[in-house]
Image (spheres, helix red, strand yellow):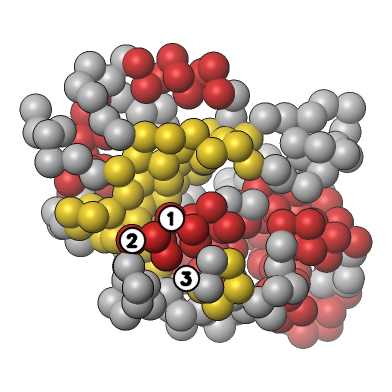
């Protein structure tokens, strides 16, 4: 797999207001969230535009996402992924005084790289493992990581059920699968004892229903997310609800 030519990338990666305004609205530009350093906003914009070009170029071949439209990719995928970063950084900083030291974050069922690639781009001092079971998508993830010069990413062709136990500090997932007792148990087991899951979800009422089907008590909270141009000031006629479900690892969840 080869990268797009510099000329094509230059034509593709033209500055767009949705990306810049969205990043500013989330809080980028301050260069940190909860004391955790983030990539400068202009560098992040550049990486995300290159990522969009790669997605548009390889979408049909690798069946990555359901749109090739630049602004839809920005809003529904990139801003949607990054809108959770302030909450994630707050959770991370509350658990460790030196989060960057050996801290490992997994993106489970990474697919086309959401939310892992935007998060890894924004947090260059953290190590990420993008876990994906499909070989062709792993190929794209490797290509995108090289294109964006993301040296803090490892691509792992694997399934959640086969991952090493107590390996990760945080596991994030977006559009992976509904949580049930079996999958919750699998995901919690791959976390270190003080780790947590962060699930990108939609409507709160659906989340509550989903969590109620897990018979054992687990500690979780629902954090509302504001995704620029999606949950407010929508670019379409429909505004959508987005939430982050944070689930703490509990030693009681064993059976």
Location of the C terminus (image quadrant): top left
Task: State yes or no: discs 2 and 1 in contact (Cβ < 8 Å).
Answer: yes
Residue placed under numbered mark 3 in the picture: 142
Residue placed under numbered mark 2 in the picture: 95
Q: Please, is residue 148 above or below residue 224 in the view?
A: below
Give coordinates of residue 170: x percent, y percent: 34, 56
Circle 3 sits in a helix, a strand or a loop, which is it? Answer: helix
Give coordinates of residue 117: x percent, y percent: 54, 64
185 displayed left or right of 100: left
Question: Dot 1, how many residues are within 10 Å of its Cα: few (below 14), some (14-19), or many (20+)?
Answer: some
Do we see residue 126 in this rendering? yes
17 displayed left or right of 247: right
Task: State yes or no: discs 3 and 1 in contact (Cβ < 8 Å).
Answer: no
The residue nearer to you, when weighing 89 against 121, is 89
Residue placed under numbered mark 1 in the picture: 91
The residue shown at (54%, 66%) is: 34
Question: Spatial distance from mark 2 to mark 1, Cα to Cα?
Answer: 7 Å
The residue shown at (17%, 46%) is: 189
Circle 1 sits in a helix, a strand or a loop, which is it? Answer: helix
Question: Spatial distance from mark 3 to mark 2, Cα to Cα?
Answer: 30 Å
Judged by depth in the image, the label closer to the viewer, 3 or 2, is: 2
Question: Dot 3, how many residues are within 10 Å of its Cα: few (below 14), some (14-19), or many (20+)?
Answer: some
Q: Earlier in the sequence, mark 3 or mark 1?
A: 1
């Amino acid at each position: 797999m080869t990268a797009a030519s510099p000329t094509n990338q230059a034509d593709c990666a033209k500055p767009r207001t949705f990306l810049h305004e969205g990043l500013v609205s989330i809080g980028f530009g301050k260069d940190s969230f909860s004391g955790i350093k983030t990539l400068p906003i202009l560098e992040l914009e550049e990486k995300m535009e290159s990522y969009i070009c790669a997605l548009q170029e390889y979408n049909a071949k690798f069946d990555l996402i359901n749109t090739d439209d630049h602004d839809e990719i920005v809003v529904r995928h990139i801003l949607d992924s990054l809108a959770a970063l302030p909450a994630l950084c707050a959770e991370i900083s509350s658990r460790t005084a030196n989060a960057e030291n050996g801290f490992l974050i997994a993106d489970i069922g990474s697919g086309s790289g959401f939310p892992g690639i935007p998060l890894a781009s924004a947090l260059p001092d953290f190590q990420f493992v993008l876990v994906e079971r499909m070989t062709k998508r792993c190929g794209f993830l490797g290509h995108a990581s090289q294109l964006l010069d993301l040296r803090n990413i490892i691509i792992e062709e694997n399934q959640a059920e086969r991952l090493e136990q107590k390996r990760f500090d945080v596991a994030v997932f977006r559009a992976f699968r509904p949580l049930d007792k079996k999958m919750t148990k699998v995901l919690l087991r791959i976390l270190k004892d003080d780790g947590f899951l962060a699930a990108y979800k939609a409507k709160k009422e659906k989340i509550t229903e989903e969590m109620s089907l897990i018979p054992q008590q687990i500690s979780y909270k629902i954090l509302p997310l504001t995704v620029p141009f999606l949950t407010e000031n929508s670019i379409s006629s429909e505004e959508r609800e987005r939430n982050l479900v944070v689930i703490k690892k509990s030693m009681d969840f064993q059976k």
